[in-house]
Amino acid sequence: MRILDRYILKSIVSIFICCIFIFLFLYIVIDILSHLEDILKHHTPLALLVRYYLWNLPIMFVQVSPFACLLSTLYSFGKLNHDNEIIAMRSSGLSIYDIAKTVIVFACVISLFAFWINDRFVPQSISVTQKLKGQIEDGAKKEKSAEAIYSLTLYGLKNRLFFVNKFIPDQNVMENIVILEQDEHQNVLKKIVANRGIYENSLWKFYQCLTYNFDKNGQVIQEPQYYDEEIMAIPETPQDFINQRQRPELMRIAELDEYIWKLSRSGASSIIRNAKLELYQRFTMPLTSFVIVLLGIPFSLILRKRATGLASVGLCIVVGVLYYLLTAVCVALGRSVLPALVAASLSHAVALSYSLRLIRSLP
């Protein structure tokens, strides 16, 4: 590594680490102050608070790392510009890409690290912190291990839709069940209504079942069939119903991909679209650090020589807000108009192309 690369990298890394610690500290302080009344009212144990914020660290890192990258880039390059070091580098024959390649590589490393944390730790962190937050707000009540799940919906294999009023996980028991079997065009072919269902020996046994058959026009054909007890070879297991209570944002990439594959056979187009959008965002969101650094490089080089630090903070806020606003608009359009892949990557593509254009326009 060149001496110049080490010099720039040292500045970027030191400021990045300082920004991360400052942002995390401010996040924790603001969150504690916002929940101070509940903490004092319920005498929340210190160990519970420490556990809550430790589980919050992966979430906070993924959220603040792009801003830390942007601010470290703006400040470092702004300071180099302020001290006329950029002019000296350019006079020696170095291009903007030669000067900035160390920062770009650093941003790639942070993006890969954020991708790993976002897939490996963030889903579990969200789930755990939601439970811990409930304990803090409710006075650290004990969790119920055998808590029932209500109003459960599952889009299963073989174009089946399950609507379950109550599911008791530890007993593998469902109550008040409605099963709809559909064709590829989402036409209901069969409807099964059962009072109770029990999973035994890898099979579902339903009680007080009433089965309706429909034609393609939705009209009932034949007489409804009643069974006091019926065994059905349904591939879904109780674990599938337990997993279904998780929202897509609480699943890892592999779990979300499998979930989409199951949904693809149910014909639930709107839910499939949202799930695909969530999946594609898992891949594109960690790129934010890389793209936002490229966007910050040309802005940092046009900073005036006075008030470099304040200008860096101001630019960081403006660029970051505009970037996330564009991302939010694209995601909103992806839920109704744009294809999921386009919606998840459009804001990054626009910011990337604009940043490259700005870099090429630099003298």
Image: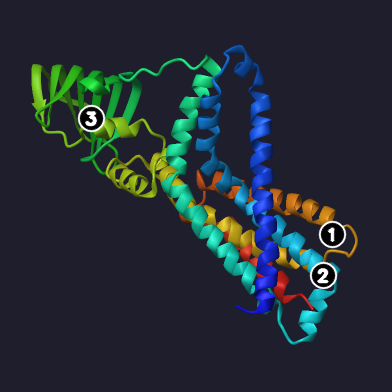
The residue type indicated by label 3 comes to Pro
Residue 214 in view, yes or no = yes
Position of residue 120 measured from the top left corner of the image (x, y, whole percent): 42, 47
Position of residue 174 measured from the top left corner of the image (x, y, whole percent): 23, 20
Indicate left or right for 233 with 271 as reference: left
Answer few, some or many: residues within 10 Å of disc 1's Cα (few below 14, many 20 plus, some between 14 and 19): many
Q: Which mark is residue 17?
A: none
Q: Which is more N-terminal, label 2 or label 1?
A: 2
Answer few, some or many: residues within 10 Å of disc 3's Cα (few below 14, many 20 plus, some between 14 and 19): many
Q: Which residue is mark 2?
A: 81
Query: Looking at the rendering, in which quadrant would you find the C terminus?
Result: bottom right
Q: Quadrant of residue 212?
A: top left
Q: Which mark is residue 308?
A: 1
Labels 1 and 2 touching (C-beta < 8 A): yes
Circle 3 sits in a helix, a strand or a loop, which is it? helix
Closer to the eye: label 2 or 3: 2
Circle 1 sits in a helix, a strand or a loop, which is it? helix
Circle 2 sits in a helix, a strand or a loop, which is it? helix
Query: Looking at the rendering, in which quadrant would you find the N terminus?
Result: bottom right
Q: Nearer the viewer, residue 320 or 212?
A: 320
Q: Nearer the viewer, residue 312 or 283?
A: 312
Residue at x-position 70% and y-position 62%: 73
Q: Which residue is mark 3?
A: 238
Q: Which is more N-terminal, label 3 or label 2?
A: 2
Residue at x-position 66% and y-position 21%: 36
